[in-house]
Amino acid sequence: MQYLFTGMAMALIGGFLAYVFRMQLGFPNQHVPGFGLVTPGKYNALVTMHGSIMIFWVAMPILIAAFGNFLIPLMIGADDMAFPRINRLSYQIFLLSALVLLASFLVKGGAFGGAWTSYPPLSAKGAYNLTPIGASLWLVAVALEFVAFLLGGINFTVTTMNSRAPGMKMYDIPMVIWMIVLASIIFMASAGPLIAGAVMLLFDQTMATGFYDPNRGGDPLLWEHLFWFFGHPEVYVVLLPAMGIVAEILAVFARKKLFGYKTMLYTAWATGVLSFVVWAHHQFVAGIDPRMANIFSVTTLLISIPIAEMVFLYIATLYGGSIRLKTPMLWALAFIAEFLIGGVTGIFLGASGTDIYLHDTYFVIAHFHYTFVPIAIISVFAGITFWYPKMFGRMLNDTLGKIHFWGTVIAFNVIFIPLFITGAAGDQRRVYSYSQFQEQMVPALRHLRTTSTVALLVMLSFQVFFLINFFWSLRHGERAVANPWKSTTLEWTVPSPPPHGNFAELPTVYRGAYEYGLPGRDTDYWPQDAPN
Amino acid sequence: MSTAAAKPIANTRSATGIPSAKLITWWVIASEIVIFGGLLVIYIMHRLGHPEWGAEAAHTNTLAGALNTFVLLTSSLCAVLAHKAADAHDGPRAAKLLRFTALGGLIFLCIKGFEWTTDIHEGFVLSSGGFWSYYYTIAGLHGLHVLAGMIIMLIVAADAAKNQELQRVECIGLYWHFVDIVWIFLFPLLYIAR
Amino acid sequence: MEHTTAESHVHHPNYVKIWAILVVLLIVSVLGSMSSIRGVVLAAAFGVAVVKAYLVAKNFMHINVEKRWVPYLLIVCLAFMVILFAAVSPDVMRHSGLHWENNAAKQAVESGMKNAPAKHE
Amino acid sequence: MLQRYLTGASTYAHSIDHLFLLIAVLVGFWLIVAECVLFWLIFKFREKDGVPTQHITGDEKHLVKWITIPHFLVIICDIVILVPAIMVWYNIKQFVPPIDQTVRVFGQQWAWSFQQPGPDGILDTADDIRTVGELHVTVNTTYRFELMSRDVIHSFAVPSFRLKQDALPGRTITGWFRPNRVGTYDIQCTQMCGVGHGLMAGRVIVETQQDHAAWMIRESNPATAGQQTAPVAPPDGSSSATVAEVRR
């Protein structure tokens, strides 16, 4: 819960940052309401913080930590995490990291403005980035955040491995739990080198070492490698839990068993392993040896296969179902529809040839927002609307939910489809104003940028519906029964909200998680803990 | 077990057959492997790329390194003997051995401190060149792990003396052995290799 | 915690003997480092290190009696590190490649080699 | 396809554009198919009272083939994309055609500066022409560029040439381009390089032989070389050392 609210608060901040710099891009060099004039330095800080916050302090805490903390004990039929104290510690460290990051807005020189990738030497020398304190704070915050999620992730993994209800076999574990655990493991295995690298960068900043300083035997390229060795698996760290949430919702609202549960699992594993060998596709033109680029181009297209297969399985799950288009289901379906776009546009960038041109253009921005928005926004809304009854014991208002849904999703597409075009036309990232570039100042592109900005305003304004719905329902929503969606998984067998210790007496599991529409039963669903 | 009542059932379950405490230790070790592994991989590739570092490595005090290895090996022995004692439900003995282990850690840190002071007196500090940066960073990170291990170990020993939480004796032992193994590799990497 | 102790009732080898072996190995590696032939030094140092690590892992950490997947887990983590090395070293370890050249590093090596003997006492 | 958005002004622009088009067609087709299937299923299997859901485990042969067939098609498409992609990459980044001219490109906070041989056609001679922000090249000439950075990581990108390469401090990265269309084109820095990143612009001016010769005379003649500007001094000493040894 704490994670959820912290994450939402950070999301609001991240959204505000996005609003400010989109305003700057849409209406260059004008006074932005609620912020003021956007100077180049401020602009850099804005984009940097937007990226960092949205990934490290929104996507990860909500998708992994919030849902993990809430769902894992409930869904595996345990009364708590295996190590509640470690769990609390991990949250405290996380909160600290968030505060450190926010503090960097206030220090002299302002927040760090060297992009969320924080490449040295720019990030290493105050003389270059002009925000020495901000840079160090950013680094410390990220390091703390990593520690928090190492602890949390390991705790999730152990809990799921050891504390399952009697009778729950590997393949009876609900998909979302599998995905969260898998994500934790991927994170654990990929973050290490970057933690070491972050310490080195911190020394470069504060103790005048030369780990990344080319003039003193260091190598800036090293950081890029370390960063992306973590940074690419990170994409799947947030993707997999989102996929898991969507899987749950699809099964429940299509009243269907997941199509090929095991295959889904294997593809997830394959993705996890492959994600460790694709990172350099972020660096095709970054000065790595051109021959390496070919290898990474191959692996990158390889990883498209398990992901594509996964999406096919999701779509196939709908076949033969009886689909109820409640708000959570709308979000889940929107996830698939939008994520497909994000996935296929990735091919352009994974193919080294086109990446030469598209690298670091708005095409990239549009691409990864088409993956990250479904992950961090759409699937999160799906999850919240789906588990809200269980979390707070009240139902959300479906009408408000649907208004919010349509407003958000349509606006989202209007934001980012123009950016595909501006990117293809050569708009580069992180440029605060295109006044210097004749080719980018043609009216057509200017209008596209403005369109996208306006759409962002629309999207943000529609979030008001969500907030109203969320907080209004906390008090006045109709009371939720134990199992409002007629779902099979264990969390729905306890009253909403679950009491302390979750289960009156701990359940025993008899079957897999998705037994819907079995012929010859009076109900169309068969809970996991029902003896017969 | 007196404190067991306070624990959630989740903590006492063991679907894998490995008790949770030991399982989490293994996972922690796995993540530590990645952290130290990453750092060492970086160091090795720089070392191979920079033959001139060999000359600077010559300044490190091989004898002190060897002595430290010996100390750590001995403390590891104490740790594993403590585990044996714990299996025999002999809490006090386990506690005694654990305290010996922690003492070993202390000696290790003292030797390291002496070594670093001499290095610094010779004018080799964190920022005086590639090799020294890595030398202090890696050894420092390892030293931190030793320190953390010692603290946890003393806490565990305090419980063990009262015959409580004996399963933790093995876990801290595992961690300590891992720290030992890391040093076993650091010793040739930082001291011997020229 | 009955199941704990019951589970971890591993056969306890003679730890002191293993410790003795480890110490001997340590001495070997130190003596090896005295040798003037670089090959011998490295072989002694790292060969011994691997053996020592194996002994500690097997006998002190009882990794051999642990559940099968535990060593596998650790090995996989190591494998990722190998991948990291394999993919990064072409750019970082080597100082020139196809259409690129790391002048700074090369210069560092040159100057370093030049005044390296001076640093010896 | 990209041509519609931005003119291609170098010899390999069109090969990248063709690759882009190929990928667009392939993935576009699959995207549309997938979305259609998705929405068709949503429509077909929407809730109807009296219609029970089917119990499908996903192991049924006749259904699994609807996964495996697209699965293999995806693999085939990947290969169809991969081969030309790597060929394009090879031709641009690995293979080097015979070089007519060499030009040095320096990135620094926050400007591009260039060094190219004067009338004698040799680099590192007295008559080298140094310019800031403007690179004058001759059309239909193959240029080899040596890319260096004086402080932080920059990225030398000429969108119209479909050219992009990061400049790393301490390294010299070489590449080539062959402009094939007269005109003035943007140079952008595409790697976050500090406060002035968004303003770090430059121009490539592609000229005919005569114009370029005229420009060169103008530049190399001290009297008329009014706009000749020496590269701005880098922000701190350390990077000037880099420059010094880079110039060696």
Image (tube, coloured by chain):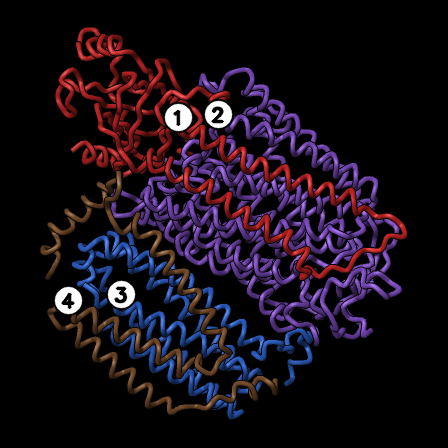
Chain colours: A purple, B blue, C brown, D red
Residue beneath the point at 39% across and 60% down: C81
Q: Nearer the viewer, mark 3 or mark 1?
A: 1
Relative depth, front residue between A240 and A91: A240
| Residue of label 2 | D2
Dividing the image into 4 quarters, which one contains the C terminus of chain D? top left
Q: Nearer the viewer, mark 4 or mark 1?
A: 1
> In screen coordinates, is D123 left or right of A99?
left
Relative depth, front residue between D67 and A393: D67
Callout 2: chain: D
- Packing grade of label 4 (10 A; few <14, some 14-19, many >=20) is some
Total labels: the figure holds 4
Amino acid type, callout 1:
Ala
What numbered label is drawn on residue B189?
3
- Packing grade of label 1 (10 A; few <14, some 14-19, many >=20) is many
Q: Where, by quadrant of the figure, is residue A79 drawn?
A: bottom right
Q: Mark 2 to mark 3: distance in Å?
A: 52 Å
Residue beneath the point at 39% across and 18% down: D185
| Residue of label 4 | C38
What numbered label is drawn on residue D13?
1
- Packing grade of label 3 (10 A; few <14, some 14-19, many >=20) is many
* Residues marked 4 and 3 touching at CB (< 8 Å): no
Counting residues from the start of the chain, the first of labels 2 and 1 encountered is: 2
Callout 3: chain: B
Q: Mark 4 to mark 1: distance in Å?
A: 52 Å
Q: Could you confirm whether marks 4 and 1 are on the same chain? A: no
Q: Where, by quadrant of the figure, is residue A367 drawn?
A: top right
Query: From the viewer's perspective, is residue A450 above or below residue B130?
Result: above
Amino acid type, callout 4:
Arg
Amino acid type, callout 3:
Leu
